[in-house]
Amino acid sequence: MGKPPATLGDIAKSLGTSIGTVHRALHDHPGVSPATKARVLQMARNLGYRPNLAARYLSSKKTLRISVNTLQGTTSFWDEVRTGIREEAASILLENVELEFRTCPSLGEGEEEALEAAIAAKVDGIITFPSRPETLRPWIRRASRSHIPVVCVATDAPNSGRLGIVAIDTLASGAIAADLMGRFLGGRAGSVGITVFDMGITEHAEKYGAFESTLKEAYRKSRKLFEERTDLAGMYVTTEASIPVLSAACDAKVLDRLTIITTDLFSDLVPYIRSGAVAATIYQRPRAQGQMALRLLHEFLSEGGRRSNQVSLAPHLVMRGNLDFFLSRQSQESASKNGQNGQEARRLVQDLA
Amino acid sequence: MGKPPATLGDIAKSLGTSIGTVHRALHDHPGVSPATKARVLQMARNLGYRPNLAARYLSSKKTLRISVNTLQGTTSFWDEVRTGIREEAASILLENVELEFRTCPSLGEGEEEALEAAIAAKVDGIITFPSRPETLRPWIRRASRSHIPVVCVATDAPNSGRLGIVAIDTLASGAIAADLMGRFLGGRAGSVGITVFDMGITEHAEKYGAFESTLKEAYRKSRKLFEERTDLAGMYVTTEASIPVLSAACDAKVLDRLTIITTDLFSDLVPYIRSGAVAATIYQRPRAQGQMALRLLHEFLSEGGRRSNQVSLAPHLVMRGNLDFFLSRQSQESASKNGQNGQEARRLVQDLA
DNA sequence: CGGAGTTCCGTTAACGTTTACGGTTCCGGA
DNA sequence: TCCGGAACCGTAAACGTTAACGGAACTCCG
């Protein structure tokens, strides 16, 4: 139990060979006969060898280059994701991660090129948002064939060979929205509208050439809905296209008799929540998603990889009362950038005041 | 920007002294004159010296011993906290943390002794649950005087000299409960009951000699409440004492006309949530609390300490629809214990299936 | 048969820090 | 004067891994 872990030297000694050979064998480096390689691998297994990461980093000083392929984004969602990734990278004790951001201007614009560039740059790992999994799949597959692990954020790319995925649990997310809507409406009769801005519509947006068109269309459609369906009692609006829907509801004078649940949290939505027009919003926790994604990738690249490759996060529920709590979390992202040196940091920071 | 970080050797060279002296100066070790010590400290600051943690760990192999002082707990809350701590400890790249669990059988039983034992054992840090902050405060103060940082979980111990605190944001937690209650009740009139099982009552329980008494009392009181206040429409029950309240509501035949919000998530509560008797429960995320606590402490002990010492977590909302999601998370704690060795782990685990 | 090229393997110097040990210098007391 | 002991400082060996170099054995071809 408490015996010191096996080292390369231990393996070498018990095999009557040298450290160099053991090292080459364990790393598939040339210059080792198949016979010795097998013996080394077997012995490593027997002794339960696990590499000492501190020694490895100290010796090679090789940094892990990780490409972060995300969207510019009209909202702060992706900014938050990137912040989470940066935070997590900074909090890694061995300061051996180097982030390369390849940010696409908008949905579906240059994503494949960005992935290709990351592969060409021979990064050690990729975190990406597969907005259209079908088109990105071959690239992800190419990456993992080049032994570059890929972690998807927010959306999955199934059957792509990706290493892992970090996302809000869609079932839990939808279920909580449904439960809330049911409880909010109480026993009152009425129908509930659900907007779906899925990938199909996204490609639609591409045809229109701009995201603006989608928003206008969202306004138009929901305005029409509000006027036709007078029995509408609730509305569940997904994605950031909630603003045009809200505007439409306002213009149609139905805002106060509708129970509205949205997703995400961005500045344009804040006044609606504060006024109570939006009953609740389902927060996708971009920061946490970014953190977990980097963590997953880094642990894998460091031979840690014991954790599940599918991370499902629970969404947060934001309402009027806890709105400020979440807003203050968002704004404190660029804080704590003062370069404390070791001496200061070591001192106990106490709350004697 | 990209220049290599300063080392002890750099400081020594630019000062015309030796590595040993620099090291002693930076660590307050004896055998260095005040003059040289000042010069070293100044130069370290100038060069922006930050210790290389990999080299440090490799050289000294000293592990950080951390004492986890929590409760046995009738519910799984503290088990979850401990699991979170263990998980986080295992995921630290430099495997230099050693956990010592000092678990008290029940509330307020041997907590001071446990803290004293931890201090006497000269651990490097302590994670504790200050059930009664007033009585524990002097011990926490003694710990930090002995340069042992203390992190509180779930409850704060103000003015105790503790290093930090990890907890659910109480304001956000209460606010979401209030908001939900308001929305759930809709326009219907009626009063809302709130149970408070705070420390005062806890000490009461001590007088009674057993926790059982508190539960019985909770039943009695709420039963009485239900019979007297016929206008009661909602109920917000905190802590794990929600079960007797629910039983009372059931026996008083008011369960179906009450909107009940509870806190925490434990097995006895599950059927009530599933049946809809409990509209929602506010989940305190014990696992996350444990993780953050260990993280805070470890970062501090590793001269990282850049993060805020006050970690406020947002609670999760559990309702019928997402109940299974949370239950499955709880049960998967003891998973992934298979001892993968480095060779296997390095291989890409792909989802080609 | 000798040299060139290969394949396999041992040796060794780093990496930055900790720690134990040895060596100065200086001062007080015998 | 000489010795003992502080007080201060330099030196060097670890820690486990990586990476570069060198050497032995063996093959191949002129």
Image: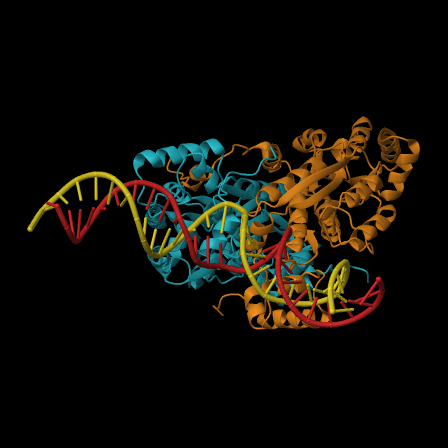
Chain colours: A cyan, B orange, C red, D yellow
The relative height of residue A64 versus residue A296 in the rendered view (above or below) is below
User: Which of the 4 image quadrants contains residue B201?
Assistant: top right
Say which residue appears at 72% left-offset and 29% top-offset.
B268
User: Which of the 4 image quadrants contains residue B47?
Assistant: bottom right
Residue A45 as seen in the image, left or right of residue B331: left
Residue B111 as seen in the image, left or right of residue A295: right
In front of the other: A173 or B27: B27
* Total numbered labels placed on residues in the image: 0
Residue D7 position, x and y percent, is: 74, 65
Residue A90 as seen in the image, left or right of residue B252: left
Residue B57 as seen in the image, left or right of residue A137: right
Does any portion of residue A158 appear in the rendered image?
no
The relative height of residue D10 versus residue A196 in the rendered view (above or below) is below
Residue A178 position, x and y percent, is: 59, 42
Quarter holding the C terminus of chain B is: top left
Say which residue appears at 31% left-offset and 45% top-offset.
A30
The relative height of residue A254 versus residue A189 in the rendered view (above or below) is below
In front of the other: B167 or B256: B167
In front of the other: A24 or B34: B34
Residue A115 position, x and y percent, is: 36, 55
Say which residue appears at 85% left-offset and 29% top-offset.
B212
Residue B205 position, x and y percent, is: 89, 35
In front of the other: B55 or B190: B55
User: Which of the 4 image quadrants contains residue A330?
Assistant: bottom right
In the current view of this chain or complex, which residue is farthest to the top?
B251
Does any portion of residue A306 appear in the rendered image?
yes
